[in-house]
Image: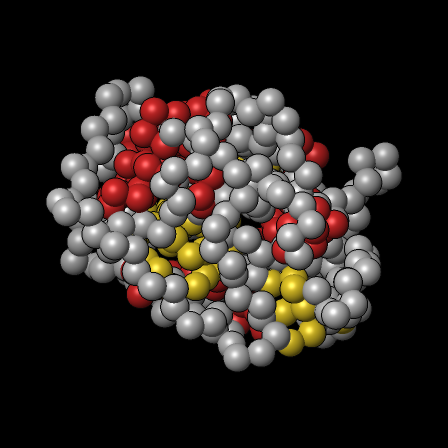
Amino acid sequence: MADSRVKRVVVMVQENHTTDNYFRGLAPYGANVAPDWPIQPNPPAADEPHDRHAYYRWLTGAHQAARTQFDTGIVLPFYAYLALTGAFLENHCSGFGTNSTPNHLLIVGGQSPTLRNPSRTQPPPVWDLPSVPGLAADAGIGWACYTGNSNYPAGFYQQLNGSKNLIPNAHFVANAAAGKLPPLTYLWHNSPEDEHPTADVTIGMNKIWESVDAVVRSGGWDDTVFLLTWDDWGGWDDHVATPNVEHTPDGVQLAYGPRVPLIMFGGPVRPGIDSRWSNHAGIPKTVMQLLGLPKLGVDRVDNDPGLADLIDPALHNPAPPAYGSKVTLPAPPQPAPKPNPLPAPPTATSIPVAPVALRGGGTLPPPNDVPLTPAKP
């Protein structure tokens, strides 16, 4: 259901970090995060294995992911501020247990025909998939995707490919400051601003800070909802085992993938640590709820509960610190609260991943282009 208070939704997608890897600093506030793993130097020295094969090895205990953590308050202070003054979805999960492209597609349209990144030596694939920007266009609602190189990932959608609404991300800050963002805006960055290892993660945080500040300077803070997330786990460890709700034909868990951060913030967003299970398919559903869009035609999205209940029209949260200013975090409560218990899994049993829905009613086979060989019991 649309909320007349919300004039725009801005979805920001960064790269390759788990909740434990980034938000150690929230442990004193009651978040369910590992509090004492070794501190990760910034920038990281390596891009850890994090494709479908690496995920399967991690899932089965055959591969030790990087069990290190950035010093949140020192390296990522603006993110710590957003997490402590907005809604921190501590049990948000990457949609699929694999790497970047499938999870970007889940954030845009709730499904992916592939479980891997497309070849960089071949022309990029284009699929006639439904998407939330396309749904907005069909409903006469303005949208823009501020994309990275080669219009990644919005250019994979036939309905969006070639649109004038695919805009280089370098234009976001100026357009936001001028009040030119449409009701639906997606934002991706290029390296090093996307935080993909081996980038200095503070560079990416500062770019997000500058982008949020541009919306604030335009007067848009009070009626904007931001959804800031990370595409996939990036090969970093996380101590929470996520529910097995979907599996590939080889029987291996596909959804949910590992926990990744999701922070929902803005003038009307109810703050606090939220412990529900959520996943990347809930991001397009939340956009649809806030903008009053009809069903997408993708069950994973249409049946998701979304996060619109975190909007309180009576709230007028203060804007965050101005870009480049000193960030002062709220004092942790005393005594430190215990983390909330993990919620029950959203389903009792895992189901096979469904065929991929196309616009117009057709389908593609379920994604199965990274077959695994599970160990026999």
Vertical relation: 71 (above or below) 314:
above
Name the residue: 38% across, 64% down.
342
Q: Can residue 137 be seen in this view?
A: no
Q: Where is residue 246 in the image (x, y as percent from the top left)?
A: 63, 69
Vertical relation: 272 (above or below) 277:
above
In this view of the protein, which residue sits in the foreground, 182 or 41?
A: 41
Residue 118: image quadrant is top right
Q: Where is residue 358 in the image (x, y as percent from the top left)?
A: 72, 67
Identity of the residue furthest to the front in this view? 377
Report whether 272 appears left or right of 158. Answer: left
Report whether 99 appears left or right of 216. Answer: right
The N terminus appears in which quarter of the rendering? bottom left
Applied colour scheme: secondary structure
The C terminus appears in which quarter of the rendering? bottom right
Vertical relation: 31 (above or below) 245:
above
Name the residue: 31% across, 42% down.
26
Tally of numbered tags:
0
Q: Position of residue 261 (x, y in %)?
A: 44, 47
Identity of the residue furthest to the bottom in this view? 348
In this view of the protein, which residue sits in the foreground, 93 or 358?
A: 93
Vertical relation: 88 (above or below) 289:
above
Q: Is residue 202 visible?
A: yes
Residue 182: image quadrant is top left
In this view of the protein, which residue sits in the foreground, 165 or 120?
A: 120
Name the residue: 61% across, 51% down.
103
Residue 189: image quadrant is top right
Identity of the residue furthest to the right in this view? 122
Q: Position of residue 70 (x, y in %)?
A: 43, 31
Name the residue: 25% across, 54% down.
338
